[in-house]
Image (cartoon, grey):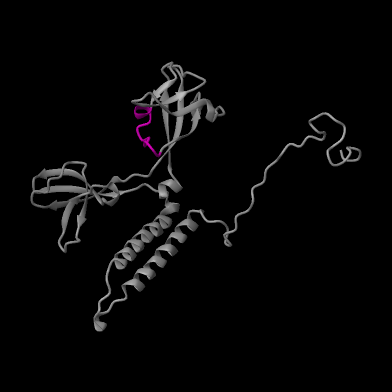
């Protein structure tokens, strides 16, 4: 959700080859299918030392979704960069987990992991068992070294988010946690014994409200809410109105044109 609200902006230099088509998986390795899109192309790109004003292509001058049935290409519609020219392409991408420098050595019999596997420490059964993450979103570590069948080293995952968004992301994560707890209570049947009765429904509702409050905090810190009163202001638009009717007659339908110009 955070990446959708404020995606990472990545710029990469693309050297021309005299053609119009450039394989995206080659020239933009961080481009994520189904998410990323090109937002800006500087062409021809000049070195900063030249001290020139950057020139940018218009959106209609490129197509980042040209597919030949097998591969996706970046198409320069109205130009073909020469081998002596460079284009700086800026595109969006989600923030991804990366390996940090903080590692932990683990001894676990027949762990079955390989280098670069995403894993997490599953303690749901009451014991600590490192488990392969089938979805990177639930991973906490990435395997960096496999010593043998019973030992490996894993690095803590981190995301290089803008510092200004730190607390917003914390509130988003807390909202997800509160919502998950609310769902757990909603699935729990209340005890029929008065002395042991737990109001699962009431707890579920309270955590639902907490999740909603935290989500509101996230949106507010991200600037996604309207003003304090949550009012949305109407848009303004300029229109071109002709002073004389288009049909060429001297009079308007409901009044003469005299004094109405």
90 left or right, relative to 135: right
52 left or right, relative to 205: right
Residue 53 to residue 237: above or below: above
Q: Where is residue 257 in the image (x, y as percent from the top left)?
A: 88, 37
| Location of residue 21 by image quarter | top left
What segment is highlighted magenta in the picture? 24-35
Q: Where is residue 106 in the image (x, y as percent from the top left)?
A: 14, 52
Q: Which residue is drawn at 43% across and 46% down?
A: 4
Q: Give the residue furthest to the bottom.
A: 195
Q: Where is residue 243 in the image (x, y as percent from the top left)?
A: 82, 35
Q: Which of 87 and 191 is in front in this view?
A: 191
Residue 57 visible, this orientation: no
4 left or right, relative to 153: right
Q: Give the residue furthest to the right.
A: 258
Main structural element of the magenta stretch: helix, strand or loop? Answer: loop
The number of numbered badges drawn on the structure is 0
Q: In which quarter of the image is the C terminus?
A: top right
192 left or right, relative to 85: left
């Amino acid at each position: 959700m955070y990446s959708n609200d404020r995606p990472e902006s990545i710029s990469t230099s693309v050297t021309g080859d005299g053609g119009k088509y450039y394989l995206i998986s080659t020239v933009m390795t961080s481009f994520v299918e189904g998410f990323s899109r090109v937002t800006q192309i500087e062409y021809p790109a000049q070195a900063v030392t030249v001290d020139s004003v950057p020139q940018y292509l218009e959106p209609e001058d490129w197509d980042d979704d040209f597919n030949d049935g097998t591969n996706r290409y970046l198409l320069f519609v109205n130009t073909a960069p020469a081998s002596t020219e460079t284009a700086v392409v800026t595109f969006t991408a989600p923030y991804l987990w990366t390996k940090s420098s903080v590692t932990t050595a683990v001894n676990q019999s027949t762990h079955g992991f390989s280098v670069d596997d995403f894993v997490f420490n599953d303690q749901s059964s009451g014991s600590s068992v490192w488990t392969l993450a089938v979805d990177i979103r639930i991973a906490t570590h990435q395997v960096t070294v496999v010593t043998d069948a019973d030992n490996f080293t894993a690095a803590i995952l981190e995301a290089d988010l803008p510092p200004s968004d730190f607390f917003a992301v914390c509130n988003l994560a807390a909202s997800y946690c509160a919502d998950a707890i609310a769902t757990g209570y909603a699935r729990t049947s209340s005890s029929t014994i008065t002395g042991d009765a737990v109001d699962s429904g009431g707890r579920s509702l309270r955590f639902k409200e907490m999740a909603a409050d935290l989500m509101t905090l996230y949106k507010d810190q991200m600037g996604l809410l309207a003003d304090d009163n949550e009012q949305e202001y109407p848009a303004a638009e300029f229109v071109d109105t002709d002073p004389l009717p288009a049909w060429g007659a001297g009079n308007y339908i409901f009044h003469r044109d005299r004094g109405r110009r």
